[in-house]
Amino acid sequence: MGMEWVRGRVIGSGAFSTVYLATRSSKHDREDRCFLPRTLAVKSCDGCSDDASMKLLKDEHGVLTRLGRHPNIVNCYGRSEGNLLLEYAQLGSLDRAGPIVPEGVLRRYARHLLRALGYVHSRGFVHCDVKPQNILLFPGRGGGMVAKLADFGLAKRVGSKKGGFRGTPFYVSPEAVNDGKCGPSLDVWAVGCVVAEMVSGKRALRMRDGENSWSFMVRIGAGKVVPEAPEELSEEGKDFLSRCWERDPENRWTAEMLLRHPFVADCDGDDDCQAIDDDDERPGASPRCHFEFAELDSFDCWGSESGASTVESGSSSESETTSILSDSALSLGYRDRIQRLPADQMPDWGEETCSWIEVR
């Protein structure tokens, strides 16, 4: 049996996909054993169902599965045909936080972003599209806000060729333009661009009058261009940006090094970077035997991820009742609970393996 969802308004869109708000059907509200949040963001290729879009969605799911959970990376709850089930950001993205973000707040966001990137890089991936639109905000447990990195559709393995530039030109690094290199330094350059943009309200690198995207990127790659730090930024902030904007990627600081920079290392109010989400509504006690899993009566909770979405006819014009096969999604919920067991290493649920890890 599939879990029924009401698909609502569009909350985001891009060249390859559309993101909808989705809520669990009211008849499931009392199912306190459901391991999915009540509200989700559903990333769909239904408006552009070409092979390239479907591949990007599949690739993004694969990357998020291999990364696992991190407090500063948007959670993924599974995939069905043409749909990716993601954590819903109640507060929107960083670019909607206002044209100018106070430096004290921005320091915390930069720290959260670097935590996410440090983890992504340690797992062998490069995000390749760090920008304010892909940094989502959530209410934090301490009363502040938590930034999480999202949209891994363009992520690549460290060292791989990008296969042509597919990111956003305003945040591209010189080596990505010149050589198509895909390394962690690419993301670090973009971090500097994000910080400068959010503190000044203007992009760190802008096109000149009459300049197109191609000539703009050529100027970045061959013109020895280094962005200028905003005047209103503190001296610590300006030094931080200079570490991000080293043109030679070998001299550019890593995310882990930047986490020790005074601009982000000394920010206040960041003791707890865990967001409040619907996980808090889940039952506190784990089931102790297979009879306590209510969903086992209706489907194979370890089922495959293949399965098409179906839309019931007769739905209202503003929402559609969508039945998304939840074998994959709910099985990831069980896997997620297992992942929370104390262990010395994180299991890679995305790979077929017969190996075991020791848990306490």
Image: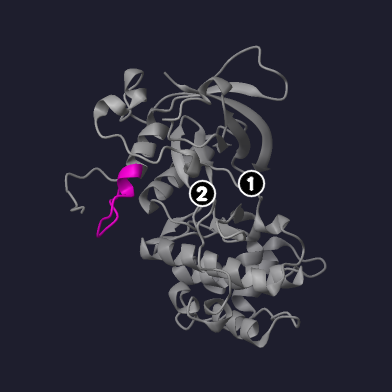
Tell me which label, 2 or 1, sits earlier in the chain. Answer: 1
Type of amino acid under label 2: Gly
Q: Which of marks 2 and 1 is in front?
A: 1
Q: What residue type is labelled 1?
A: Gln
C-alpha distance separating marks 2 and 1: 21 Å
Left or right? Give the position of 68 relative to 279: left
> x, y (%) of residue 202?
76, 69
Residues 83 and 327: in front is 327
Q: Which residue lies furthest to the right in this view?
A: 209
Where residue 260 appears, as percent x and y from the top left, is: 48, 80
Residue to which mark 2 is pinned? 153
Question: Pointer 2 and pointer 1: residues touching (CB < 8 Å)?
Answer: no
Question: For residue 341: magenta?
Answer: yes
- The residue at 47%/35% (across/down) is 36
Can see residue 51?
no
Instruction: Kindly state the secondary structure of the residue where label 1 is placed.
Output: loop
Q: Is residue 180 above or below residue 292?
A: below
Q: Report if residue 66 lies within the magenta region.
A: no
Range of residues picked out in magenta: 337-349
- Give me the residue at 42% from left, 34% from top: 329
Question: In the image, is 24 to the left or to the right of 96?
Answer: left
Q: Residue at x 54, y 70 (%)?
A: 111
From the image, which quarter does the C terminus lie in? bottom left
Q: Position of residue 300 (x, y in %)?
A: 31, 24
- Which class describes the residues within 10 Å of circle 1: few (<14), some (14-19), or many (20+)? few
- Tell me the residue that label 1 is attached to: 90
In this rendering, does residue 45 appear at all?
Answer: yes
Give the x, y percent position of residue 335. Answer: 33, 41
